[in-house]
Image (cartoon, rainbow, N blue to C red):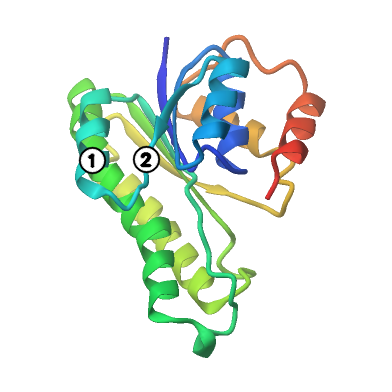
Amino acid sequence: MTKALVTGATRAPGRVIATTLAKAGWEVHALGRDRIALEEMRGDHGILPMAMDLTDRDYVRFVVEGMEPEVVVHAALRWPEEIGFLRLTEADIDMALEVNLSATLHVTRAVLPSMIARRRGALLMASPDYRVAGSAVERTVAAAVDGLARALDDELRDTGITVHRLPLGKPPFHGLGLEAISLLAASGFHLNPMPTSSESIERQEHEHGT
């Protein structure tokens, strides 16, 4: 059974991706802060809950390194409510960078050694389209994630590891689960059984949208 780690799994889009992979027969480890949502996912889909905050770097690194997932989906996204750049606080900026960019870098660095040793692995990095993102901070982070995915895919080209940016689209993120499956299939991870229908996935995404 293929093992996947999904960050940001207690809110859309991470929850949609986690449940889609679980329905496809994967062993899914869902990382998020909402313990109630995690327990619901375990009861409904057999997903393994991991209640923690991505900003706790030492603990996250300890847990992730021991897990050795074959696939990691970075879907932890948290943006300031304020959009205007000059109205952002230092805490707003630090939070956006820490959760949406730094955590992606640190989790990726923790899982890569075991993937490279197996010569097999895939990384999906969810992010909005930086050209149409809603704020300067969001556009900056989205562009950085896009650049990270491209740079890592080039650097890891001969290691058996693939890296993809996963475009978010707009809420309620219709088709995001199928898009993740398509990217993983292109990386050699063929899911079986497939989700029952695109309609069921879209309904699920609507129910758990932001």
Q: Crowding at label 1, few (<14), some or many (≥20) Cα neighbours within 10 Å?
A: few
Q: Crowding at label 2, few (<14), some or many (≥20) Cα neighbours within 10 Å?
A: some
Kindly identify the amino acid type of the residue bearing the numbered disc 1.
Answer: Tyr
Q: Is residue 172 above or below residue 81?
A: above
Identity of the residue drawn at 40% across and 65% down: 95
Which is more toward the observer, 106 or 118?
106
Q: Is residue 163 above or below residue 103?
A: above
Q: Position of residue 36 (x, y in %)?
A: 55, 33
Residue at mark 2 to residue at mark 1: CA–CA distance: 8 Å
Residue 134 falls in which quadrant of the image?
Answer: bottom right
Identity of the residue drawn at 82% across and 27% down: 199
- Of helix, strand and loop, which one carries label 1? helix
- Of helix, strand and loop, which one carries label 2? loop
> Is residue 20 visible to us here?
yes
Which is more toward the observer, 86 or 138?
86
Residue 116 falls in which quadrant of the image?
Answer: top left
- Circle 2/circle 1 CB separation < 8 Å: yes
Q: Position of residue 66 (x, y in %)?
A: 21, 25
Kindly identify the amino acid type of the residue bearing the numbered disc 2.
Answer: Met
- What quarter of the picture does the N terminus occupy? top left
Residue 13 falls in which quadrant of the image?
Answer: top right
Q: Is residue 155 above or below residue 84?
A: above
Residue that numbered label 2 is attached to: 52
Q: In the rendered structure, find residue 59 and report the number of the disc placed on it.
A: 1
Q: Position of residue 208 (x, y in %)?
A: 69, 39
